[in-house]
Amino acid sequence: MEIDEAVRGCTDRRMRTKYGNAVYVVQRAFALYPFEEVAFSFNGGKDSTVLLHLIRAGYYLYKKDSGDVAQMDAVKNCPLRTIYFESPCAFPEINSFTYETVSTYGLPLETIHSDFKSGLEGLLKEKPTKAIFIGTRIGDPNAVGQEQFSPSSPGWPSFMRVNPILDWSYRDVWSFLLTCKVKYCSLYDQGYTSIGSIHDTVPNALLSDSSTEKSFRPAYMLTDGRLERAGRTKKTNHKIEMNSVAGNGMNNIEGEQMISRAASIIVVGDEILFGTTEDKLGAALCKKLHAIGWRVSHVAVVRNEIDSVAEEVERCKSMDDMVFIFGGLGPLHSDVSLAGVAKAFGVRLAPDEEFEDYLSQLMGNNYTGDRNEMALLPEGITELLHHKKLPLPLIKCRNVITLAATNVHELDTEWDCLLDTQESGLVQAKPFVSKHLGSALSDVQIAPVLAKLCLEFSDVYIGCHRISRAGPLVVNLTGKDNQRVEAAAEMLTSSFEGQFSQVNNCK
C-alpha cells in the first residue's frame, strides 16, 4: 500500500510515530464499529485530505491483520461512506478538488446542503451511523475537550467522533502530504494556510513573496504553524486588564513615568512549603520589578497541584498587569505549572511545534520525539519570548510569564532578556526610590507622627518593621518622587530630633 510504504520508508522519526498512532486509531474504529455504520466527513481541506489517506492505510492494515488477503487489492481505496457539506460560500477550487478526489478513490459520496447539525440529523435518520471520522486537530476552535474517541456533544445526534489526527501539528500535516506525494487543493500553493469561506479567508500575508507583486509562497513554507489561521479575516482583540495603582499609601500620579504597574509572583513548590528549601527567587524578583518602577502586590507559594496553581493564577491575572511564575516546569509528575495556567484560562495543553523544535535541538538523543510532554503549552494563548542568550524561549500566556530560573544567577539572565524583548510587555517606568530610617523609639511614641505623615505624603509608601523585637524600629519610605521621599524623611526626623539615623542594610 503506497501510503504505508512512503511513511515507513521516510527518515522522519516523528512522522513515523504520528502516522503509527493515527492508523492505530483508524484500525481500532473499524474493529469497534461495522463498516457500513462508519462515515467520513470530507471538506477538501488539507486536514481531511490527510485523514482520507490515513483511513485508506488504516483500513488496508486492518484487513491485512485480519487475514483477509484475498481482497487486499480491492480494499486499497476503502470505499467508506463520505459526507460533504457543500456551501455556496465555499471556494470553487475546494468543490472541484472534493469531487475529483471522491471520483479518484471511488468514495460513495453523500452531499448535504444544510448546516452541519441539521444535515447530520437527517443523515442519521436515513442510515444508522455509529462513528464518523473527522479531521479535527488541537488548536481548531472546536477541538477543546475532545479526545481521539469523543461522543458527540449534548443536543447533537448521537455518534462517536473519531479524531485520528487530533495531536497533529501544522508541520505534521504538511510533512505527511509531502512525504506521501498526494494531491491536495491548489489554493494551498497560492498562500492559503487555513481555508474557510470565500468571505473570511485570504492568503496568509506571512507567505507574501516580496519579489513578485500579489504572489504568495506555498502553505507548506509557513515556518510557524501557530500562525496557520492568520489568513482568516475575523478580527480578534486580546485585552489585558490593567488595574489602578492606588492603594497602600500610593496614589495614581499623572504621567507615564510616574505610573506604577502591578505584578504578582507565584512560586510553585512543595519543597518550600515543607521547609526543605528557601525561596530566594521571589525576593530577588521583587527588587528587579521595583527597579523598573513596578509595584509587587502579591507573592504566593503554592503546592505542586494543578488546581492550586490554577486558582492562584486566575485570581492574580485579573488583578495585576503581569503575573510571574517560578517552579513546576519540566517532565516530572510534579511539574504542573503550565497545566495550571491552561486551566486558569480555560484552555487545554496542546503540542507547540516551534517549542518542540527547540527541545529537540537542546536535548538531542534524549528527546522522545513523538509526544514530548514538555512541548505541551496552553493552546491559543501562548507566545514564545525568544532571545539569543536563552537556550529555550520563555513562555508567556497573555499576561502570565513562566520563568525557568532555579537560582538568582539564572534569574539575572532571564530578567535581562525579558527587558531586552519588546514582546514581554515589561514597560519600564520611573523606578522606586527608598529611604530607611532606624530608631530606638517605641511604637507608641512614633505611631501618632507616622499617622500624620501618611496623610501629608499620600504618594509615599510608609511601612515599618523591626530587625528584632528588642532591636531598632526601621521606617521605610518608598515612592517615585525622590523630593517627596526626602521631604517625608525630613518631617519624620525633625519630629524626633537626633532619634533617627539612616539604615543602609535593613534586612
Image (tube, helix red, strand yellow):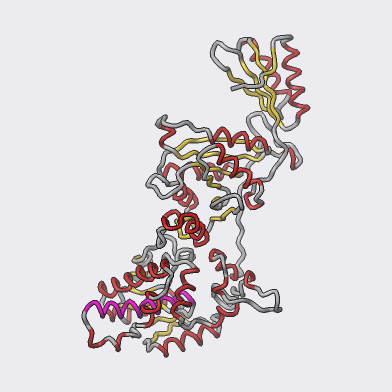
5 displayed left or right of 96: left
User: Which picture quadrant has residue 245?
Assistant: top right
Q: Is residue 478 above or below residue 258?
A: above
In this orientation, which residue lies closer to the viewer: 408 or 185?
A: 408
User: Which picture quadrant has residue 57?
Assistant: bottom left
Give the x, y percent position of residue 248: 63, 30
Please report the bounds of the magenta region as a residue range.
46-66
Q: At 49% across and 85% down in the image, what residue appears?
A: 97
Q: Residue furthest left?
A: 67
Residue 3 can be seen in this image? yes
Q: Is residue 416 above or below residue 384?
A: above
In this orientation, which residue lies closer to the viewer: 324 or 416?
A: 416
User: Which of the image's four quarters has the C terminus?
Assistant: top right
User: Which of the image's four quarters has the N terminus?
Assistant: bottom left
Residue 159 can be seen in this image? no
Q: At 64% across and 10% down in the image, what residue appears?
A: 441
In this orientation, which residue lies closer to the viewer: 90 or 340?
A: 340
Give the x, y percent position of residue 429: 71, 41
